[in-house]
Amino acid sequence: MKVVILAGGFGTRISEESMYKPKPMIELGGKPILWHIMKYYSSFGFNDFVICAGYKQHVIKEFFANYFVHTSDVTFDFTKGDAVEVQDKHSEPWKVTVVDTGLNTLTGGRIKRIEKYVDDDDFMLTYGDGLSDVNLTELLKFHKENGKTATMTAVQPGGRFGTLEINSDNRIDSFAEKKLEDGGWINGGFMVLNKKVFSYIDGDQTTFEKEPLENICKDGELVAFKHYGFWKCMDTLRDKNAFEELLASNKAPWKVWE
């Protein structure tokens, strides 16, 4: 199953670092947050990724182009010209497709642009700036059992996020992104989507969190997988520092690998 990661935005609220690189490439503990997200999915057996790149997309491509060398022991034999011998391989079993989805394309447009790379009925989608300890196996099972177009992981961080109204059978009755109410359930990413979702997206200037998700919701095709554990996104330098503190103290809930 494909895991699609939105990684093309400008990251203006963390411009201290995003002026040099895409926000998903900002490092936590010496590795990009994008890498942490992928490692988490990989720990559940999901290893086929499609990265929706845009702003400074070359940085993401260069990271993966050099990843094999950077994560392995390598002998450079200058007596034999430019011979390179890999001594010990440490890279992950990943297949990574990095797609330039445009500099100014909105989230829905980025998803629409990678439609040709999705070959299964369902695929996973998340944002390139959020980490969680959501059980991805249970999330996928929940999606299959409900048989809806979209399953969204709902979390309760409080403050500065829009809220979801979830009824007793986990169907979302209303979806409104980024209002100013405190509390409530919000869109935490970590979604499972059916390919029917592409028909809800018009083009590059479509924001996925507006008309597409609102219309999927109106059609009764959006359900919530409630997650009561850890979830956090990296919007500001303060958020980045909070992630770093969790890693430094060995208390990072998403770090389930050795």
Image (cartoon, rainbow, N blue to C red):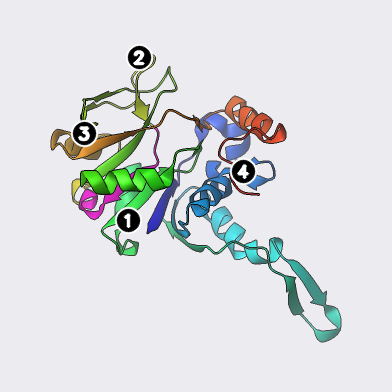
208, 36: nearer the viewer: 36
Label 4, on which residue?
A: 20
| Residue shown at 38% from the left, 16% from the top | 183
Mark 4–mark 2 CB contact (< 8 Å): no
Residue segment shown in magenta: 188-198
x, y percent for residue 50:
43, 57
Nearer-N-terminus badge (4/3): 4
Relative to 67, residue 124 above or below: above
- Residue 72, compared with residue 166, is above or below; it is below
Query: Disc 2 and disc 3: Cα gap in Å?
Result: 18 Å
Q: State which tag comes first along the sequence, 4 or 2.
A: 4
How many numbered discs?
A: 4
Residue extending furthest toward the top: 182
Residue beneath disc 1: 113
Which residue carries the number 2 mark?
Answer: 181
Q: Secondary structure at mark 4?
A: loop
Q: CA distance from mark 4 to mark 2?
A: 33 Å
Q: Nearer the viewer, mark 3 or mark 1?
A: 3
Q: For the residue labelled by badge 1, is the local secondary structure a helix, a strand or a loop?
A: helix
